[in-house]
Image (cartoon, helix red, strand yellow):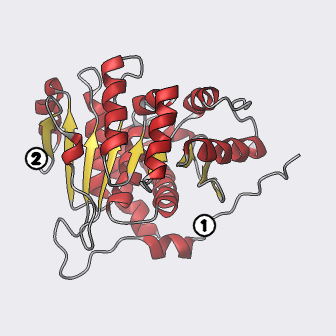
């Protein structure tokens, strides 16, 4: 029998040290370029939420690649967003990070995991993008398959970083596809074990979302216990994907980026609840409270 996993935590001073303050000679590219492949025709709001969250966390250039039907709506959300259709887009052409110009990609927010075309697009992104990739939403359903496991393994073999952000149901699908005899976590020990074994199976950083969030790179497990029920609303997961993606795009190590993003997400939820009440918080309120969460560190 393996020993139970004892999670670590990040101190406030560690998180403060991770904040990506821009240098005096920074420009929009040195502050990070995030490609956000999200927003199907049915769920354009997911891309809008994730992209705005990424900007609030410091990304210098957020580029949304979405369904053609979603382009104008997402453009209307904020004029500083760069938005284009994914029709005919060559994902293998996305630039690779280079010194002083960090890049990352988020894929799957607002994807329909039951749509074969969207699943194929998600796996194409994960397979071909050289920069760190965060898979969320429908992209997780695409990975929960034999082909998904192959793509994750191929990516790991090439040394390309991958972050997965499942909630309990998505984690169960990923575990079933990998033939892991694990149920949805009922306590911290089970959650830590699930996060670590999923990380080892997919050779990826796992962010297991819930009232408490557990993160694992296959070796370490970190607990983030600041969650609030105010975040139990549609769209808040898209906000988290944009936040973690932002820190990846600014060059942070995946575990550091994910812990910082998850902590600030929880803190922003708490700030939002103090303003409008725990009942009334919506995802847009969380985005509006990101600056306060950052300044609180």
Instruction: Classify 148 as above or below 211.
Output: above
- Quarter occupied by residue 8: bottom right
Mark 2 to mark 1: distance in Å? 36 Å
**Front: mark 2 or 1:** 1
Q: CB under 8 Å between callouts 2 and 1?
A: no
Q: Is residue 154 left or right of residue 14?
A: left
Q: Indicate the position of residue 97 as horizontal and vertical percent values.
A: 28, 62
Q: Indicate the position of residue 70 as horizontal and vertical percent values.
A: 17, 28
Residue appearing at x 37%, y 41% in the figure:
126
Q: Is residue 12 in view? A: yes
The one of 230 and 183 positioned closer to us in this rendering: 183
Q: For numbered disc 2, what is the local secondary structure?
A: loop
Q: Indicate the position of residue 51 as horizontal and vertical percent values.
A: 27, 46
Residue that label 1 marks: 10
Q: Indicate the position of residue 140 as horizontal and vertical percent values.
A: 47, 33
- Please rate how many residues cluster around mark 2, counting C-alpha atoms within 10 Å: few if below 14, some from 14 to 19, many from 20: few
Q: Is residue 289 left or right of residue 141?
A: left
Q: Is residue 120 left or right of residue 226?
A: left
Instruction: Classify 175 as above or below 284.
Output: above
Instruction: Classify 162 as above or below 13.
Output: above
- Please rate how many residues cluster around mark 1, counting C-alpha atoms within 10 Å: few if below 14, some from 14 to 19, many from 20: some
Q: Furthest residue to the right?
A: 1
Mark 2 or mark 1: whose residue is earlier in sequence: 1
Residue appearing at x 32%, y 59% in the figure:
249
The one of 205 and 265 positioned closer to us in this rendering: 205
Q: For numbered disc 1, what is the local secondary structure?
A: loop
- Quarter occupied by residue 284: top left
Dot label at residue 79: 2
């Amino acid at each position: 029998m393996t020993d139970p996993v004892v999670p670590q935590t990040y101190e406030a001073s560690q998180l403060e040290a991770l904040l990506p303050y821009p240098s005096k000679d920074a420009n929009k590219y040195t502050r990070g370029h995030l490609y956000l492949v999200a927003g199907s025709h049915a769920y354009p709001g997911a891309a809008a939420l994730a992209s705005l969250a990424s900007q609030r966390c410091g990304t210098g250039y957020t580029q949304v690649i979405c369904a053609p039907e979603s382009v104008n709506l997402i453009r209307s959300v904020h004029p500083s967003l760069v938005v284009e259709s994914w029709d005919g887009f060559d994902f293998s052409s996305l630039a690779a990070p280079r010194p002083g110009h960090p890049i990352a990609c988020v894929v799957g927010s607002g994807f329909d995991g039951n749509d074969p075309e969207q699943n194929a697009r998600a796996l194409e992104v994960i397979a071909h993008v050289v920069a760190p990739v965060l898979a969320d939403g429908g992209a997780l359903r695409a990975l929960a398959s034999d082909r998904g496991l192959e793509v994750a393994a191929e990516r790991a073999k090439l040394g390309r970083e991958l972050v997965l952000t499942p909630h309990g149901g998505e984690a169960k699908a990923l575990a079933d596809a990998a033939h892991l005899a694990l149920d949805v976590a009922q306590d911290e020990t089970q959650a830590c074990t699930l996060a670590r074994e999923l990380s080892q199976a997919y050779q990826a950083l796992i962010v297991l979302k819930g009232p408490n969030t557990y993160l694992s790179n296959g070796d370490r497990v970190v607990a983030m216990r600041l969650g609030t029920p105010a975040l139990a609303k549609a769209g808040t997961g898209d906000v988290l994907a944009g936040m973690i993606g932002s820190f990846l795009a600014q060059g942070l190590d995946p575990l550091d980026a994910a812990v910082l993003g998850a902590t600030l997400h929880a803190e922003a939820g708490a700030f939002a609840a103090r303003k409008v009440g725990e009942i009334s918080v919506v995802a847009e309120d969380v985005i509006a409270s990101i600056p306060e969460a950052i300044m609180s560190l």
